[in-house]
Image (cartoon, rainbow, N blue to C red):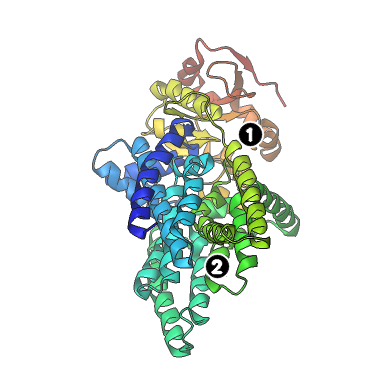
Amino acid sequence: MTDRRALRLLGASVAALPLLTLLFLPIRTIDDAFITFRYARNLAHGDGLVFNLGERVEGATSLSWTLLLAAVETLRLPVEPAAFVLGVAFALLALRESYLLGRSLGASAGACLAAVALVAVHGRFWLVAGNGLEGGLFAFLVVLVARKTVEEADTRLIGVILGLLFMTRPESLIVLPIVAGYQLLGTSGSGDRTAARTRALTISAAALAVVGAVTIWRLGYYSALLPNSVAAKSAVSTGTETLMANLVSGLSYTVRFEIAHLPLILGTAFALILAPKAKALWFCLFVVMAELPAVLINGGDWMPHYRLLTVFAPVLAAPLALCLSSAFEDWDMPGPARRRSAWVLAVLSVSAVFMLSRSPWQTTPGPRFTFHPITSCYQFMATRLKPHLAPDDIAAAEAVGLFGWILDETTIHDPLGLVDAHHARHGEYHLNWGKTDYDHLHRVRPAVLVLHEGSVVTPEKIDRGTDGHFARDYSAWFVNQQPPCAPYRLIVYIDNDRLERLRPALTGLVIEPLPAG
């Protein structure tokens, strides 16, 4: 199969397989995506890159994705479907780059097509790419920088892509020393150490120029080195015991990802066994491993489908392609080589079936765009509250994304600190959910606070953290009402000073008072 024919076949499969896969997946926009949407909308409307007007707090982790969606808002396009389309489009580009990376590693065109096709029908990959966050963009950039590095492309281009990676996910700065180290090892095998050092320095300079410019701007605009959302979810300052607990949780997260993506992991392992001295193969593995420090320090992530690591699937597909290429070649040879090939292909086939079966498939085709049940509850309550809130009211909620998107003219207080600097720096740590300073929450005095049963912010913690003063100043109810919040109920607190005005938002609902103390 020629490269030209393979690329045509790839184009056809990229157009067909993902679209067919998406028809059988329940696409969910993650609540945190609406945080980014609100930042993008405020920027597009000339109010600055902020969540609440006048409050410079960077609660959106991905700066590049936020700026891209701000451009969408400027064009007056609906941002939620645009985020889905852009995420899927970048994921499609990532598949193309994955094919080209596999070819650069030396895999045959047919093997590359098979490896890419596996990712193309992997439901978790598309659910991560289409959840409204930066997954598709990051997947494209990370496999692009891997391919450009292996192919010894223009060093300034590689550096700029690394800078864009940092703007997309700050923890990806770790990829820079991996790329620079690969250059220093002598990618061409020519032994020209001076040329290798020059390439490494040029890449580093170009990348650090972008990183430095973004950091200087961030310091000037937000008075912070990193997004506030990173500080809110970071366990670095919480003590050894918490860090160890996160390490265990992060290891569990990583192992579960590896089990759920077994053919990609086994394919990479088999490729390294077959070619242990292939520097490009090790480079691809280390690029994927660059995410592990963030996973281990933060204890993984609460979002579904292993979204921190699933975005590396296109990178892992390239070593898998090399493994398949070797197996296909051995199949044409009699004796032990063919038997070895049969075992490898059988193991990879069984693991591929297992991986694909773990995706949350729909039984009937048709695009279905949904929210998590808990997110729907916050949407429900925000819609009921909106007519009753005054311009100077502050509304607080545990899930501030869609809640704040609907209450677009209301100042939103985030008790988990993603968009509140005080909570992020001084609050009680809640694993990878955020941090809460309960006394600060009380001092803010929101007009209404919406939580849900099962939340990390609980009535008991609020009472303990405020010495019961919050319960004294607020009236609270359970809301037993559609839409269902999975097994949970909403909890609504209303400030007693504004009870007469806001209490009608609960009229007609099935409610019961929250028990005191």
Q: Are marks 1 and 2 in contact (CB under 8 Å)?
A: no
The total of numbered circles placed on residues is 2
* Left/right of residue 278 with respect to residue 2 in the rendered view: right
Q: Is residue 428 visible?
A: no
Farthest left residue in view: 75
As drawn, 104 above or below 10: below
Farthest front residue in view: 334
Q: Position of residue 45 (x, y in %)?
A: 27, 43
Residue at image mark 2: 281
- Residue count near mark 2 (Cα–Cα under 10 Å), binned few <14, some 14–19, many ≥20: many
Per the image, label 2 sits on a secondary structure element best described as helix
Amino acid at pointer 1: Ser
As drawn, 175 above or below 400: below
Amino acid at pointer 2: Leu
Residue at screen point 64% across, 44% down? 350
Residue at image mark 1: 455
**Tag 2 or tag 1, which sits nearer the N-term?**
2
- Place residue 235 in its image quadrant: bottom right
Location of the C terminus by quadrant is top right
Q: For the residues carrying marks 1 and 2, which lies nearer the camera in this image?
A: 2
* Left/right of residue 322 with respect to residue 255 in the rendered view: left
Farthest right residue in view: 241
Q: CA distance from mark 1 to mark 2?
A: 43 Å
Q: Position of residue 373 (x, y in %)?
A: 54, 26
